[in-house]
């Protein structure tokens, strides 16, 4: 079916169930950003493939809400579909709640509560009730339509994440969780997010193409813990190790039954952002539902010393692959026919040769020229640009290594580029350096540091419509909360975060530079407090040919030279003589 035919079929279902508006999400029962293909209902009905977006369909209208990363992509993919684009971050654009309240007079809105977060449903329920609109969460109308060609649910087995990489046993992590439960006077804690469950249980899997996730729920009580998963996917050795750590394995179908039978008046903690609304509703009012921050998310954001050691090693191997890629590209662009897709394949080949490489951490973004302005552009063999000299190639990529997750962006000038391109490139570099070189008091919220990157942009009447950075997991998700530069989460030693400002000019170019860093304490502390800095994890040259040196201050030049010296010292022992020579030139002082 075409998108228009799918929407028409959904409207028929809506009339049958007396539904006035239906909300379609790309989500699963764990409110994941990264999904098995089985759950991509919004993509199926709209054709929009971005990782963030929501479709709302009424009998007369249809709209997609997405953020600034996807404006260009969504406009292209929705063309001719009959679905309007709502640029959610723009001034004057109605929220989904505002849209529904304006378009409906009473009536009923519906969505699938098993793939909607408790946070989203509670907000929508409260707003709808004020307008006399009913909200149903028990209908999966898209699931009833999407039968032919729907991917199967994952069936691979869970694997244990080795203790020598995890640093803590499951029993030790459970003890830390229970200490938090005691502080919050909780009788039970429900873990919904997959990366939280997998971190807690020291499990990994292959349920999601670019994240080593295994699908399961968990419930933790003061004296017991249970993991809910399909029994055929848990081997006897895995079950035995879990039991040794105090975890009982129960069938996945028992999860919703068990939450419905928790003791009355018990205090049950759950994270509204990562536990689905069907869980919240299933608990009912017979228990005290306590909405809290995800305890596991907070804990796994602060990496232990074992994790950090392996994360650094993973970035060294990734740096070797990147150096070999940049060296190859410099030569290949002179004669070979290259496309955005072919360079993705080459980068994968080079990463695959590194120790403990398990796959990419997200679909590689390789945008040449105007395609670089599409923030999450992704080429494919049939739809990709040929590389030519005279513009930028933006490559945002990463790897999953057994010891850690990497994410790096470099913007590469192909041949001589215009002065205006060089100016944009240098502004992004300045923005990047200003935040990367920050000194700040421990526990400073990331949001308070965002201005260090954006001030360069604002001073030049520029901005970028995405976050300046996100937390990153340890052989888990490339995007991890709660730490980023948009939230009030305090930054602590051991947190890993990306720094990635950019400039995007539609139809012309995209520039972004990205490193992963770890928060470290300075050795000295006094009556003014404990100060921290960002220590680079990413080890890869930043192209110097596109810089306008006259725009940089002495301090900015000094930072770049110091960073390049670190890159050379860390990577050169791992490279062949010819590669060391190339790296020496790429990291020579500016």
Image (cartoon, rainbow, N blue to C red):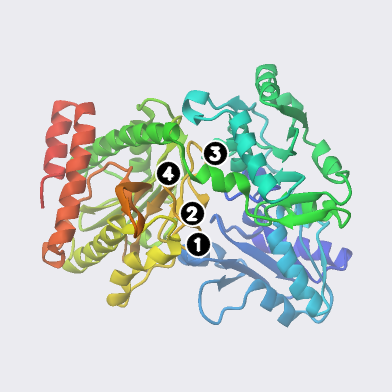
Question: Mark 3, mark 1: which one is toward the viewer?
Answer: 1
Question: Mark 4, mark 1: which one is toward the viewer?
Answer: 4
Indicate the secondary structure of the residue bearing disc 2. Answer: strand
- Mark 4 or mark 2: whose residue is earlier in sequence: 2
Between the C-alphas of marks 4 and 3, the distance is 27 Å
Label 2 CA crowd tier, 10 Å (few <14, some 14–19, many 20+): many
Residue contact between numbered discs 2 and 1, judged by CB atoms under 8 Å: yes
Indicate the secondary structure of the residue bearing disc 3. Answer: loop
Q: Is residue 335 something that shows in the picture?
A: no
Which residue bears the numbered disc 4?
A: 494
Q: Nearer the viewer, residue 121 or 546?
A: 121
Indicate the secondary structure of the residue bearing disc 1. Answer: loop
Label 4 CA crowd tier, 10 Å (few <14, some 14–19, many 20+): some
- Mark 4 or mark 1: whose residue is earlier in sequence: 1
Question: Mark 4, mark 2: which one is toward the viewer?
Answer: 4
Q: Which mark is residue 487?
A: 1
Q: Is residue 212 above or below residue 30?
A: above
Which residue bears the numbered disc 3?
A: 209
């Amino acid at each position: 079916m075409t998108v228009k035919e799918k929407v028409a079929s959904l409207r028929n279902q809506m009339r049958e169930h007396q539904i006035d508006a239906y909300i379609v999400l790309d989500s699963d029962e764990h409110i994941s950003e990264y999904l098995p293909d089985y759950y991509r209902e919004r993509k199926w009905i709209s054709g929009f493939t971005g990782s963030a977006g929501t479709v709302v369909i009424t009998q007369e209208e249809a709209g997609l809400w997405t953020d600034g990363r996807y404006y260009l992509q969504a406009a292209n993919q929705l063309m001719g579909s009959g679905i309007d684009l709502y640029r959610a971050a723009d001034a004057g654009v109605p929220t989904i709640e505002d849209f529904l309240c304006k378009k409906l007079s009473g009536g009923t809105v519906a969505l699938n509560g098993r793939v909607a977060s408790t946070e989203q449903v509670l907000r929508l329920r409260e707003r709808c009730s004020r307008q006399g609109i009913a909200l149903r969460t028990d209908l999966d109308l898209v699931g009833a339509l999407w039968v032919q060609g729907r991917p199967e649910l994952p069936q691979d087995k869970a694997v244990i994440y080795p203790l020598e990489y995890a640093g803590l046993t499951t029993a030790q992590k459970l003890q830390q969780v229970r200490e938090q439960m005691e502080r919050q006077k909780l009788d039970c804690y429900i873990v919904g997010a997959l990366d939280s469950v997998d971190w807690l249980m020291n499990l990994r899997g292959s349920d999601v193409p670019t994240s080593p996730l295994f699908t399961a729920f968990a419930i933790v009580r003061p004296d017991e813990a249970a993991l809910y998963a399909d029994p055929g996917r848990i081997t006897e050795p895995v079950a035995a190790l879990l039991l040794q750590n105090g975890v009982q394995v129960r069938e996945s179908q028992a999860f919703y039954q068990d939450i419905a039978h928790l003791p009355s008046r018990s205090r049950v903690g759950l994270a509204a952002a990562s536990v689905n609304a069907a869980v919240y509703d299933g608990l009912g009012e017979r228990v005290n539902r306590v909405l809290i921050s995800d305890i596991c998310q907070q804990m796994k954001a602060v990496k232990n010393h074992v994790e950090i050691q392996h994360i650094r090693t993973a970035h060294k191997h990734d740096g070797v692959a990147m150096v070999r890629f940049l060296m190859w590209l410099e030569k290949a662009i002179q004669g070979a026919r290259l496309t955005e897709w072919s360079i993705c394949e080459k980068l994968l080949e080079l990463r695959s040769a590194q120790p403990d490489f398990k796959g990419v951490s997200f679909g590689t973004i390789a945008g040449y020229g105007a395609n670089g302005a599409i923030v999450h552009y992704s080429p494919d063999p049939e739809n990709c640009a040929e590389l030519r000299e005279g513009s930028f190639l933006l490559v945002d990529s990463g790897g999953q290594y057994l010891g850690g997750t990497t994410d790096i962006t470099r913007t590469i000038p192909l041949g001589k580029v215009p002065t205006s391109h060089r100016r944009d490139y240098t502004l992004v570099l300045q923005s990047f350096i200003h935040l990367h070189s920050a000194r700040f008091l421990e526990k400073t919220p990331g949001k308070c540091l965002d201005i260090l990157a954006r001030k360069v942009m604002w001073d030049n009447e520029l901005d970028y419509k995405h976050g300046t950075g996100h937390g990153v997991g340890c052989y888990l998700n490339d995007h991890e909360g709660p730490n980023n530069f948009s939230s009030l989460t305090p930054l602590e030693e051991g947190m890993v975060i990306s720094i990635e400002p950019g400039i995007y000019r539609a139809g012309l170019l995209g520039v972004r530079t990205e490193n992963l860093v770890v928060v470290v304490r300075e050795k000295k502390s006094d009556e003014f407090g404990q100060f921290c800095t960002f220590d680079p994890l990413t080890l890869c040259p930043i192209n110097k040919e596109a810089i306008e040196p006259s725009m940089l201050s002495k301090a900015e030049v000094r930072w770049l030279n110091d960073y390049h010296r670190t890159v050379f010292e860390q990577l050169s022992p791992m490279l062949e003589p010819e590669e060391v020579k190339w790296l020496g030139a790429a990291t020579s002082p500016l």
